[in-house]
Amino acid sequence: MPPKRKRNATMISPSRGRGFRKPPPAQRQKKPRQNDLVNIMEETRDEGQPSFSQEPQEIRPTFGLPEDLVGQIQTVSADSRPLANTTAPEHLGHLRSEANKLIQGSLSANTNKAYTGALSNFKKFLSHYGIVQIFPVPIDHLLHFIAHLSIAGTAYRTAILYISALSYIHKIRGIQDNTQSFIVKKALQGLHRSRGVTADPRTPLTLSILQLVVSALPSVCRSPYEAVLFSTLFSCAYYGLLRVSEVLNIQKAHISLSNFKVSILIPRSKTDQFGNTTTLHISKQPNSLTCPVHWILKFLRLRPDNAPSFFFIHIDKKGVTRYQFNFLLQKAIQFHSIQGHFRPHSFRIGRATDLAKQGVPDSEIKVLGRWDSKAFQNYIRL
């Protein structure tokens, strides 16, 4: 009788399979509770994103792509699986640099500055509450941030700006943007309802007030040159319905002058980000105290030769800043003890209000102020 063959431990009866034991079933993962938002977001968090305590390369003050990020973007196959980048990085250096420059150039300087400030406020919020900053930003972090802004009395438009900045960061890096979630939008809507419609606190600087402001400049400016400089600035800002960013960036080559009118080229503005240009034509005014043509002619006789391209400059050839514009405005307002909340935009509001009082049609006011929406109606105070 032949000896019995020893059974291998891994062998089983042919009736139970092909000779191998079935592998043990995989352990069933514990399903998170639906109401445990923090745990859900922890599980879906992108662990590859570093915390802000390490000042990662992901977030830069310019909100542009890091120089090496373009080359790291993965291509996708037909079945949506990422493919490895087979091109040597050194062959893409100039393309990455150009792509980065184009993306950074998509934002205006003002938007870049506003987004940078928004990110700074978000980081302060996280630091205050001891929350680690991660990307994508979890929904609960966004909701807590909106709640923090609500308690702090932040205006609705400011809150929208902060969330828009965070949304931009997510989109520019191609990661999940939780700012677009339904619950975040509802929180912002609730903030809007709680704030209600707030009236613009800025006081219109009408023609009668402009006359007082200009008459005060010789007394509040440190030199006759400065008085002429700011008289020219303020009269142009009023009659041209100019934003402070527009009037301060006027160059000498942009001005065409005659005895009866002045033409000012605006190469770029808030509503003209692509530089289609607009030319303003301001006629000579009967009152020389506030006439832009009068003041530009006078300023040209005093303006230093071989000066920089910017038209409005000090005697030392340095350009006028936004702070200096507002500072001299406040000094002139205080000189006459005029009551109101005056800001650089008050010139634009005042001119729109005066035009409406004169019976100028809304359509013409809209064109003169270069508005592309009905926002101009908020500037008219009758």
Image (cartoon, rainbow, N blue to C red):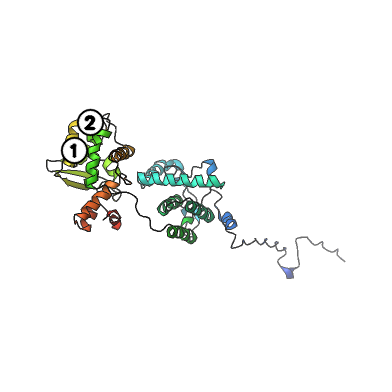
| x 29%, y 36%: residue | 320
Residue 247 x, y percent position in the rendering: 26, 42
Position of the C terminus by quadrant = bottom left
Residue 5 x, y percent position in the rendering: 82, 63
Three-letter amino acid code of the residue under disc 1: Trp
**Labels 1, 2: front one:** 2
Residue 233 x, y percent position in the rendering: 24, 40
Q: Residue 259: name its quadrant.
A: top left
| Residue 172 in view (yes/no) | no
Report crowding for label 1: few under 14, some 14 to 19, many 20 or more residues within 10 A (C-alpha): many
Q: Which mark is residue 295?
A: 1
Q: Which mark is residue 66?
A: none
Q: Which residue is mark 2?
A: 224
Q: Nearer the viewer, residue 220 or 302?
A: 220
Residue most toward the front? Answer: 337
Three-letter amino acid code of the residue under disc 2: Pro
Residue 308 x, y percent position in the rendering: 26, 33
| x 36%, y 45%: residue | 110
Q: CA distance from mark 1 to mark 2?
A: 13 Å
Q: How many marks?
A: 2
**In the rendered view, would you say 194 is above or below 338?**
below
Q: Nearer the viewer, residue 199 or 4?
A: 199
Position of the N terminus by quadrant = bottom right
